Amino acid sequence: MTKKPFTDITIKKLKPQDDRYDIYEGGGLCVRVFPTGKKIFRYRYMLDGKARTITLGQYPYITLADARQQKRDIESARARGEDPAADKRAAKDSTFGALAELYFQLEGIKLADKGKEIQRVLKKDVIPVIGTMPVGTIKRPDITQILDSVTARGNTRQVNITLENIARVFNWGLNRGWPGLEMPPTFKMSKPFADAERDRVLSPDEMRQAWYGIEKGKMSTAMIDAIRLILVTAQRPGECLGLHFEEIDGHWWTIPADKTKNKQTQRVYPVSYTH
């Protein structure tokens, strides 16, 4: 059966199934469809009698025209006797995705939530767009494209958080001398939106209702204790959930700098803990 050339319409109509599957248009260019609905371009070719496969990028962040151009570039490299798959594997070691994974492992684990929130933000909106790009090739318009996509969902605060997390990973990589990273594309990049001031506080009656009302739910005793600790100390949930016995001295709670948002040690009073 003759394979038909891809069009944007045919790619958009490809539906996820229980298992991932590949659709070829001929000449080795393929779209792989995952059960999650994610679609990536791949190119399969032969070199020295062995099959090679290169992932070109995720659709629609990589367009059909982009994928075909990459395919032509690879064919030109093959004609020169080069192995593009080997070159791509070497380049992968310097990508933003590889940098972010190392950040999660070495630095994210130090955060109060063990880096779960920054992983969620980056893996949802950032890594699908620039994860396969060597950091030295990422430009400010690439970052703007990501922020515009988040803005389109209507959550302006999340836009600022996304930019902050991208910059955090780039700056960390710069300090480590990450290959190809000379000037982060986020350098001196302003937050797209002004941070909203939070002026809403609970009244004494609301505090009492929250204190006793949570007992009526189905939460564990540990979770009830954590919420009450937030109420009486006005500290962030991540800091309260990450509290350790050694941080308590009498009625004082000392929060280490590596657990606070501003990276400064905080002393909180009063704390009364009963087991």
Image (tube, rainbow, N blue to C red):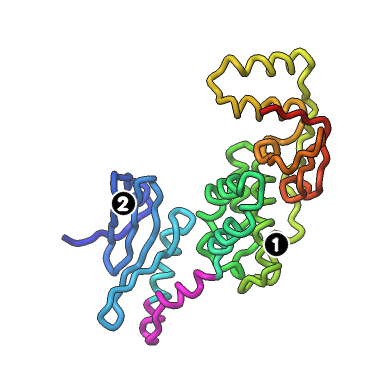
- What residue sits 83% from the left and 40% below the top? 267
Q: Position of residue 155 (x, y in %)?
A: 63, 37
| Residue 44 counted in the magenta span | no
- Callout 1 amino acid: Asn
| Residue 91 counted in the magenta span | yes
- What residue sits 77% from the left and 25% below the top? 200
Frontmost residue, 9 versus 61: 61
Q: Is residue 144 visible?
A: no
- The quadrant holding residue 208 is top right
Question: What residue is pinned by disc 1?
Answer: 171
Tags 2 and 1 touching, CB below 8 Å: no
- What residue sits 81% from the left and 43% below the top? 266
Q: Position of residue 242 (x, y in %)?
A: 66, 41
- The quadrant holding residue 194 is top right
Q: Secondary structure at mark 2?
A: loop
Frontmost residue, 258 versus 73: 258
**Magenta stretch in the rendered image:** 75-93
Circle 1 Cα neighbour tier, 10 Å, few/some/many (<14 / 14–19 / ≥20): some
Q: Secondary structure at mark 1?
A: helix
Q: Is residue 256 visible?
A: yes
Q: Position of residue 192 (x, y in %)?
A: 72, 47
Q: Main secondary structure of the magenta part?
A: helix
- What residue sits 79% from the left and 42% below the top? 254
Question: What residue is pinned by disc 2?
Answer: 20
